[in-house]
Amino acid sequence: MIVVRSLLGLSLCVVLMSVASLPLRAQGGPALQLQPLSDAAPMPAPLAPPTPIRFEAALLNAANDLLSKAKIDGGQSRVDVVIDPLIDGATGAQSSATHLQQQRILQLIRTKYPRFRVLPFSTESLLKRPLVLIGTFTAINNDGAPTGPRDAYRICLAFADLRSQTVVSKGVARALPEGVDPTPMAFFRDSPGYAKDSATDSYVKSCQGAKVGDPVDPTYTDSVLAAALVNEGIEAYNAGRYKAALELYENALSMPGGEQLRVYNGMYLASYKLHRTRTAMDAFGKMIDLSLRNSDRLAIKFLFKPGSTQFYYDRVDRAPYQAWIGKIAQRTATNRSCLEVVGHTSATGMPAMNDRLSILRADFIKDQVEAEERVLQGHLVSDGRGSREMIVGTGRDDPSDALDRRVEFKVVKCAT
């Protein structure tokens, strides 16, 4: 018990008394005695993490839960569904694994759930306000350790009802990594830039961060029509139809919610394949501006030789690197920005060596940027994080975890 008295500006007098020695008495009632700490109820034991199971079985469990428990108002005999392609929950990329999941879900609907009619993911279909199936597939540490090995995949599936603007069903499961092919599809493998993107973030939040009955993230619903065009562009690029892909990205850009990192990546890639260098680099510059304006950072996938600060020897892959560096320098100088250049590595190798290598790679890129624009000298600093900030974290050292070996440009306050 604490008693505090103030006497006309005199010092405070604080009296501490043991509450265990005082009875608590309700008005007109008997004294109530506090229970000693030793008699307190024991804390519940933490729940054990879910046990991952084979990939195919885990996907089937999640999909059956999603489809069998959907709460849909109106009692329609047929329910229209579109699938906004499933993505990696950490990178936003479509992969061989997410495409396989989508195929398996389609097969399951056709054989077991005829109530659902699957329509193409198109602007025409979306205007009918169907259910939108969204889903993420994310490498995680099953025990929840932030730096532990990614020894499982978390599957999340959800139905977003465009009529009620709510999540009406979910299915979740955990899968073993055996038999999983996380190789990114061509568009995501070739994309040079990565940054936090509001459209992709809202997709992930609407699946992973929402319960049944929760509203769908409004950024997702506001940009879903543009997302349909973006996906058509991705499919066109993957099929080698670069002119069609470029037109689709340009159309998506003009729609509400269409200014997305994926759109500028797509415009760059399609233009580069069509040998429209000026259009490609203009799109690359706009990608830089968007990323540094909205998220304060941009990751670029420079491929280095293993254990080296020199670029990978493949001439096709490294051909645009100097143009990227020149555009980064130009946009940074134009915006009068100051940047921290941060190197990253995968977990392969000794931590101390990875830390050193990441710093050396950051120094190399910093020097290259400053050489392009001399006015940037004194406006750039470099640092390395080694493998402490991996995005994917699977340790495969292939295109599926290329982002773990990125160089990041982060806006920082300029020294006065």
Image (cartoon, rainbow, N blue to C red):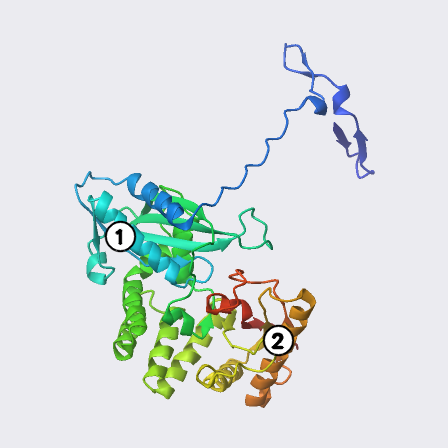
- Residue 39 location (% of width, % of height): 69, 21
Between disc 1 and disc 2, whose residue precedes?
Answer: 1
From this viewpoint, is residue 163 visible? no
The quarter of the image holding the C terminus is bottom right
Q: Residue at x 35, y 74 (%)?
A: 266
Can residue 111 be seen here? The reply is yes
Which is more toward the observer, 243 or 306? Answer: 306
Q: Secondary structure at mark 1?
A: helix
Residues at badges 1 and 2 in contact (C-beta under 8 Å)?
no
User: Residue 253 at what x, y percent from top left?
Assistant: 32, 72
Q: Residue at x 33, y 68 (%)?
A: 258
Q: Amino acid at mark 2?
A: Gly
Q: Residue 106: which disc?
A: 1
Q: Which residue is mark 2?
A: 307
Closer to the camera in the image, 181 or 381: 181
Is 40 in front, or is 273?
273
The image shows residue 76 at horizontal and vertical percentages of 18, 41
Q: What residue is shown at x 42% (from left), y 65% (from top)?
A: 183
Relative to 104, say whether 39 is above or below: above
Label 2 environment density (alpha carbons within 10 Å; few <14, some 14–19, many ≥20): few
Q: Quadrant of the N terminus?
A: top right
Is label 2 in a helix, a strand or a loop? Answer: loop
Q: Residue furthest front?
A: 179
Seen in the image, is 249 located left or right of residue 325? left
Distance between mark 1 and mark 2 Cα atoms? 44 Å
Left-right relation of 329 to 241? right
Q: Position of residue 129 (x, y in %)?
A: 23, 52
Disc 1 residue type (three-letter) = Leu
